[in-house]
Amino acid sequence: MKEFIEKMPKAELHVHLEGTLEPEHIFSLAQRNNIELDYSTPEEVIAAYDFHDLPSFLTIYYAAMNVLRTEQDFYELAYHYFERAKADNIIYVEPFFDPQAHTSRGIDFETIIGGIKRAQEDAEVKLGIESNLIMCFLRDMSADSAMEHLEMSLPFKDHIIGVGLDSDEKNNPPEKFAEVFAHARAEGYKLTMHCDVNQEDILGHIRECLDLINVDRIDHGVNCLEDDGLVQEIVSRELGLTICPVSNRFVVQSLTSAEIKKMLDQGIKATINSDDPAYFRAYLNDNFIALAEEGKFTKEDIVQLSRNAFDIAWLPDSRRQNYIDLLNEFNSN
Ligand code: ADE
Ligand code: ZN
């Protein structure tokens, strides 16, 4: 199974580029940008990764990003991820980025997007990895700030396929951003939102995503299984869920393998993703392999999880079919 997973062509639809910032890279960027760190080795950084819920993770995640300053820094961040993705046989990616986490430190939007875009172009040519960017708003910042960043993104609309919503979910429901997401939709962006596992009023948040925001997919969303009405709605709309097993384990002490199996059985388009792989110390193949070890998945289930990702990717149908053909060819050999 491990070799099968490693060789299987895959798409990744839920990975935060800032969550791919490896400790060694934090050190090299700190040195280049003359920034003092509280740690003296990458191992010490990893030892401080003590997450047990979303806020405890976010504190460390935002602190580390302070080393990202120049266009070249953002280029390297993204390109290192694409190289790592290549090693996992990922052929298509829709990565998230968090512009407000950088503009709030005085970094220009153009610097961020310029570096990432250049890495995407190089990854396509040199690594054969296609990607489409998703800009996330930080839900613990104001709706006005989100709207300002939406406006800032418009000159770069050709390089951004959709918008998402991440960061601290407590008391920050989808409804807070209804106007911003309506505006994003009118500008042609696809829409997704995090509904992180076991958050306060999570079923209410998923319901708002469906009824108020009219999302094109949901990030995480595992808790939908607790409400038959939500499940029916998600299945009938063919809405995809981007599940992140190792990330879930930090919150619920399980890879949610039983839930993922149930989703497949119920016809929900569940996909497997890494979320913040440098922090959770698990890239996409590690997530699939751990999941297959914890749960009862056949090879067909594993292929279905990969097929779901191509099915729900924000791609033109002809491109989608090319990828599904590659997966089918792999599966028939
Ligand atoms: N930002 C980066 N990773 C995140 C996660 N797992 N949940 C919410 N916001 C995030
Ligand atoms: Zn996430």
Image: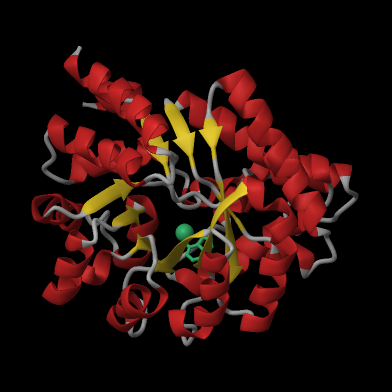
Q: Nearer the viewer, residue 252 or 140?
A: 140
Report the quarter where the C terminus lies: top left
Q: Quadrant of residue 121?
A: top right
Measuring from the top left, give residue 287's x and y in whole percent. Answer: 34, 42
Q: Is residue 44 visible?
A: no
Residue 81 locus on image (x, y percent):
58, 37
Number of residue marks = 0
* Outermost residue toward the bottom in this view: 171
Q: Quadrant of residue 124?
A: top right
Whether residue 43 sits left or right of residue 116 in the image: it is left
Measuring from the top left, give residue 301's x and y in whole percent: 15, 38
Residue 32, image x, y percentages:
87, 42
Figure check: 122 above or below 26: above
Can you name the residue that lies furthest to the top here? 333
Where, by quadrant of the figure, is residue 263 drawn? bottom left
Image side of residue 173 versus residue 261, left or right: right
Q: Is residue 266 left or right of residue 72?
A: left
The image's colour scheme reads secondary structure
Q: With respect to residue 36, does 1 lie above or below?
A: above
- Nearer to the camera, 109 or 107: 109
Which is more toward the observer, 105 or 185? 185
Q: Residue sitting at 81 percent across and 50 percent down?
A: 111
Residue 95 visible in the snapshot: yes
